[in-house]
Amino acid sequence: MSDRAPAGQFIDAAIGLLRRLRDEEADSIAAAGTLLADTVADGGRLFAFGAGHSSLAAQDLVYRAGGLALMNLLAVPGVVGVDVMPAPLGSALERVDGLASAVLDSSPLRAGDALLIISLSGRNALPVEMAMSARALGVKVIGVTSVAYAAETKSRHASGTYLKDHCDLVLDSKIAVGDAELTHDDIPAPFAPASTVVTSALLQAVMATAATTLADRGIEPPLLRSGNVDGGHDWNARVMEQYRDRIFYRH
């Protein structure tokens, strides 16, 4: 570890990753934003799924000031965040075969919708099966993952494949295997994970692309406003009423 303060090192590492996304994932971000815009324009619905800490980036898209009102969270009991007790149970559920299919069977997902699946490693059974099953339903799938894991880890799905292998589009977060940006001579484990801030920024870049793509086509993007500014609640009520058949978090 250098003499520079660790806070500065971490922020520099995150900035470096964000610059890589800007420069290396521009085409993929544009394609993902266009796919979401196409889905909205064609009457489809938008969903996001992530397990464990990957769920944080998914949740950041839902009922979000400045975000698309049509983005819904596809929740799997026990794996959304770290609210399940004991916490390791959530990690165990990610490796359970059949769970994704059971969730999709009882979800509102249908052909013509779009699903963002966020999984840093992309190696567990849940995100792999989620992508496979969703595409079989006619759902367009955008995978958000670190492609490096496929080269450096072993898949935990029976097929031996990864999330990236079952998507219409893949966004590579560029996060290194292990998700820790810093080391220290006196600390035995690497530390300071950057996946949450980087993945959230990556997805907001996609949302910005989707919104402007709709606007360029003469379609007002169904955006939400902050409830903490004057008129925000009235604006949101109008948008949610207009698109009530495509919004599931309000019921």
Image (cartoon, rainbow, N blue to C red):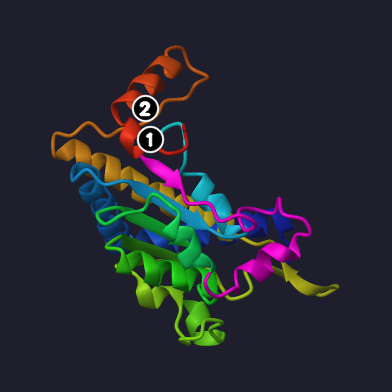
Q: Is 224 on the left or on the right of 139, as rendered?
A: right
Which of the marked residues, 2 or 1, is nearer the chain's N terminus? 1
- Which amino acid is tagged 2? Met
Question: Which of the pair 175/50 is nearer the observer?
Answer: 50
Q: Main secondary structure of the magenta part?
A: loop
Can you see residue 181?
no
Q: Is 153 placed left or right of 206 in the picture?
A: right
Crowd tier of the residue under label 1, counting other residues whose Cα lies within 10 Å: few below 14, some 14–19, many 20 or above = many
- Amino acid type shown at disc 1: Ala
Question: For the view shown, which residue lies furthest in the right direction?
Answer: 186
Q: Which-is-in-front pick, marks 2 and 1?
A: 2
Range of magenta residues:
70-98
Which residue is located at x 18 percent, y 34 percent?
219
Tag 1 residue: 69
Give the x, y percent position of residue 136.
31, 69
Residue 209: image location, x then y, percent: 29, 47
Q: Of residues 83 and 152, which is closer to you in this image?
A: 83
**Other residues around mark 2 within 10 Å, as few (<14) / some (14–19) / many (≥20):** some
Q: Which residue is mark 2?
A: 240
Is residue 55 rendered to the left or right of residue 221?
Answer: right
Relative vertical location of residue 202 with respect to residue 134 in this rendering, above or below: above
Q: Is residue 136 left or right of residue 182?
A: left
Q: Can you see residue 82?
A: yes
| Label 2 SS | helix
Q: Is residue 210 above or below residue 102?
A: above
Q: Residue 142's mark?
A: none
Compute the Cα span from label 2 to label 1: 7 Å
* Residue 163: x %, y % from top left: 44, 73
Instruction: Name the foreground residue: 238 vs 202.
Output: 238
